[in-house]
Image: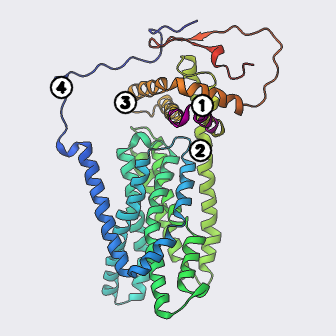
Amino acid sequence: MAISPTSTPYPAYPPRPDRAVLRHPHWWQRGWVRYGALITLLALSGLVILAMVRRQTGTEGFLVGLGLAVLPVPWLIAAFRWLDRVAPGPWRNLVFAFAWGACAAALIAIVANTFATKWIATATADPAGAHTLGATVIAPIVEESAKAAAVLLVFLFRRRHFTGIVDGVVIAGITATGFAFTENILYLGTAFGADQLSGDRGIASVTAATFFVRIVMSPFAHPLFTTLTGLGFGFAAFSAERQRARRVLLPICGLLLAMSMHALWNGSSTFGEFGFFAVYGGFMVPVFGLLTWLAIWTRQRELRTVREELPAYVLAGWLGPAEPFALGSMRARRAARDYARHHGGKPTAKAVARYEGYATELAFLRQRGRRGKAGGDFVVRERALLDELWRRKDAARPALEYAARAAAPPQPVYAGPAPVPTAYGPVYGYPAVPYHTYNPYRS
């Protein structure tokens, strides 16, 4: 039995608007103008923050701080990229997030914190109290707000790639990783300069103590704080467009939690001799473990969404029967890419990887549409994704079928009569897709 083009549940392309009513955007609305302005802003911020840190630490201290501060960066980025492997966002979003944290957010934090601390010290004539107030109140508010700006920009202008909790966690974590990188250069470089003046060397030096606290014990501190903001935006992404109160309040609540946790961490040194270790062991580590579990659980939930939403497209002939299972398993996805690379080279493996990404985005889009949370462009976006999949089906389907067979659990032997092959299609004029051709359990 075939599904005729007129009975398909998917509409045709929407009619193109008349050329006479098309309006050309103003020059400031063009993409290249926005990208140019953003790149210029980040580049200028980077040059200014580089000069400020170098002036405070000296050239030698800057180079030492840079060499030590870069150590945790690859591990943190790799962890967030692993978390984002189900539906990886574009690299340009991650590069923007890291650059914003390392340049713009760090510059805002240094300037605002320095100005606020000096103003409080002058107003109260109490430099020590101003320093404590600046570290426990001013710094958390300024720094978390500056980092949250990157998450807000991606949420507003890259909404298509910001669909849930994992996206919020990844963007927030990468932004905070960039911020911590610049801050660690400043702290480690300053500590090295202090050791040069005092003549201290070895494990008893200020540099060694700073490295142990910031790089060994708590490299996840800033990512952990800002992740709370990312969770707020991630939950807001689940909300329908008409639920404006939730879309505004949830990010604000996440930001307030990030500020509170940051303030508690900065103020741990004022809680007594063992205040730092009490906050670290009794609060930071448990929260880190809880958020890690939540992120991994959400990742598995995304895979389950892929397995549950894509069979509808199998019935319409867009996907083969093996694909929902293969696309809902990270092991099968990796096997499909390896198979494609072995038999077709890197271009084929790249096509399979893009096929997996488009299929995952399609599953998330269908879930939002089924829950009434998709935007007005749902039909257009769905059709565009289906066309992207169809163009890559010749490269992707054999690889996914192989991966499904390799990753599937052993099936019981069926002793009954052989099944009668059926066909699904044609859809939109595409050829039929015989079921037996793509049956992964066929002997």
| Label 1 secondary element | helix
Kindly identify which residue carries mark 2: 299
Distance from Cα at disc 3 to Cα at disc 4:
20 Å
**Disc 4 element:** helix
Q: Quadrant of residue 315?
A: top right
Q: Mark 1 points at which residue?
A: 343
Q: How many angstroms separate mark 1 from mark 4 (CA)?
A: 49 Å
Q: Is residue 337 shown in magenta? A: yes
User: Above or below — where is 133 with respect to 79?
Assistant: below
Q: How far apart are the two marked residues, 1 and 2, measured between alpha carbons?
A: 30 Å
Q: Is residue 133 left or right of residue 279?
A: left
Callout 4: 10 Å neighbours few (<14), some, many (20+)?
A: few
Foreground tag (3 vs 1): 1
Q: Which mark is residue 21?
A: 4
Residue at image point 44% right, 71% down: 183
In front: mark 1 or mark 2?
Answer: 1
Residue at image location 42% in from the left, 81% down from the top: 60
Q: What residue type is labelled 1?
A: His
Q: Residues within 10 Å of mark 3 (few under 14, many from 20)?
A: few
Instruction: Please report the bounds of the magenta region as a residue range.
Output: 334-352
The residue beneath circle 3 is 376
User: Which of these two is toward me, 48 or 107?
Assistant: 48
Q: In what element is the residue under mark 3?
A: loop
Distance between mark 2 and mark 4 Cα atoms: 44 Å
User: How many residues crowd around disc 2 within 10 Å: few (fewer than 14), some, or many (20 or more)?
Assistant: many
Q: Position of residue 400 (x, y in %)?
A: 61, 29
